[in-house]
Image (cartoon, rainbow, N blue to C red):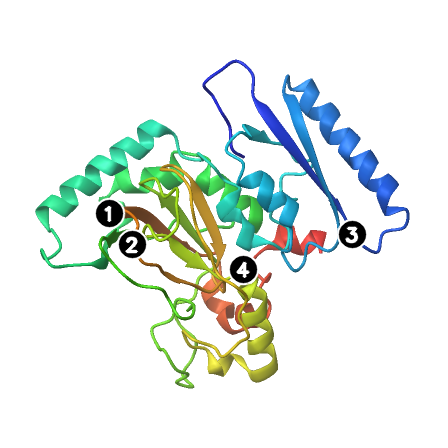
């Protein structure tokens, strides 16, 4: 949800969608839109636009929803069910969870990042990515954007409440300009670029990222994502076997998107969603973000199954499938 708290009233949009094969789909869509508008009105919101679509949400193609999410004048986005925006479309979540982390929590984490960078600065000629990996037990101010906000609860909405482990590590990710770079392809987080045939290690359920600086335009240190590749990767591993696990599975790729947002915005991405580091040549600011790798309880016992069934850890989504 993107909310404007500067006034007493928020102006918002209501996205609604029904399956393409539904009988009398139009009337079902109209009824759903009516329920959502009534609910928004009951909350005291002024609805400026109702966004409706007919089609499958499985492939993540929601052009009207994307337009609404990109509208800076949309104060609140209202849905009938909280998971409607995420159902079989985890690639969209980077665009949904605006201002999930309170400003004061972001400020404390930013101050701690300043201390860490000052104590151990990048080399003066560093351009592009520079990372710090720190134990969360030692860094309460850096863990707070995940736990002292709605972020962890939103992640649990996808996996199931009480089923996510607390992350042992936090990553500070810097992208230092000028960095003239355009990624050629995505990767998934794996230590081995090519298959090794060894048992699968180091997978997790989903990535939670908190933007620590505004990224309002492209090529400003943005993370690049390839929408829908969490599904395509799973098909590849089902067809060819999880023993081919590696960072760069040979799959057909869609057009990438660059994550944009403001400090305090939350990104949730499936582990199998292809992503990569982008360039930072249209901004003079060092991009900062925090990343947490979240695992469902027992994930380590079924890594191979998870590679082939992308919703293995996502019981709420499986129930709605």
Q: Can residue 90 be seen? A: yes
Q: Can residue 162 be seen? A: no
Residue located 40% across and 83% down the image: 198
* Residue extending farthest right: 24
Tell me whether the residue at label 1 lies in contact with that at label 4, contact meaning CB atoms closer than 8 angstroms. Answer: no
Q: Earlier in the sequence, mark 3 or mark 2?
A: 3
Which mark, by number, is residue 280?
A: 2
Q: Residues within 10 Å of mark 1 (few under 14, many from 20)?
A: some
Tell me whether the residue at label 3 lies in contact with that at label 2, contact meaning CB atoms closer than 8 angstroms. Answer: no
Q: Is residue 213 left or right of residue 306?
A: left
Of marks 1 and 3, the one in the foreground:
1
Q: Residues within 10 Å of mark 4 (few under 14, many from 20)?
A: many
**Residue closer to the observer: 215 or 302:** 215
| Residue that label 3 marks | 19
Report the quarter where the N terminus lies. Answer: top right
Q: Earlier in the sequence, mark 1 or mark 3?
A: 3
Q: Tag 4's secondary structure?
A: loop
Tell me the CA gap for discs 3 and 4: 20 Å
Of marks 2 and 1, the one in the foreground:
2
Tell me whether the residue at label 2 lies in contact with that at label 1, contact meaning CB atoms closer than 8 angstroms. Answer: yes
Residue located 46% across and 35% down the image: 150
Tell me the CA gap for discs 2 and 1: 8 Å
Q: Earlier in the sequence, mark 2 or mark 1?
A: 2
Q: Residues within 10 Å of mark 2 (few under 14, many from 20)?
A: many
Which of the 4 quarters of the picture holds residue 262? top left
Tell me whether the residue at label 3 lies in contact with that at label 4, contact meaning CB atoms closer than 8 angstroms. Answer: no
| Residue that label 4 marks | 227
């Amino acid at each position: 949800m993107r909310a404007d708290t500067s006034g007493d009233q928020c102006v918002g949009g209501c996205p609604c969608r029904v399956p393409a094969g539904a009988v009398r789909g139009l009337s079902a869509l109209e009824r759903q839109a009516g329920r959502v508008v009534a609910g928004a009105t009951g909350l005291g919101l002024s609805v400026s636009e109702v966004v409706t679509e007919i089609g499958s949400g499985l492939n993540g193609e929601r052009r009207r929803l994307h337009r609404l999410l990109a509208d800076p004048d949309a104060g609140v986005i209202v849905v009938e069910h909280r998971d409607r925006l995420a159902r079989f479309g985890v690639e969209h979540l980077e665009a949904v969870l605006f201002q999930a982390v309170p400003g004061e929590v972001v400020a404390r984490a930013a101050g701690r990042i300043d201390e860490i960078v000052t104590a151990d600065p990048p080399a003066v000629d560093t351009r592009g990515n520079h990372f710090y990996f720190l134990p969360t037990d030692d860094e309460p101010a850096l863990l707070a954007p995940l736990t002292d906000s709605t972020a962890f609860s939103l992640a649990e909405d996808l996996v199931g409440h009480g089923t996510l482990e607390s992350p042992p590590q936090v990553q500070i990710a810097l992208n230092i300009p000028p960095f003239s770079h355009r990624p050629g392809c995505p990767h998934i987080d794996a230590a081995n670029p090519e298959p090794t045939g060894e048992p699968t290690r180091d997978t997790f359920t989903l990535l939670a990222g908190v933007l620590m600086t505004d990224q309002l335009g492209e090529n400003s240190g943005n993370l690049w994502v390839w929408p829908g590749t969490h599904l395509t990767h799973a098909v590849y591993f089902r067809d060819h076997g999880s023993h081919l696990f590696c960072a760069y599975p040979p799959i057909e790729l869609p057009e990438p998107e660059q994550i944009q947002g403001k400090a305090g915005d939350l990104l949730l991405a499936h582990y199998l969603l292809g992503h990569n580091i982008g360039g930072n040549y249209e901004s003079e600011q060092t991009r900062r973000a925090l990343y947490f790798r979240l695992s469902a309880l027992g994930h380590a016992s079924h890594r191979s199954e998870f590679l082939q069934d992308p919703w293995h850890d996502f019981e709420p989504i499986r129930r709605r499938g």
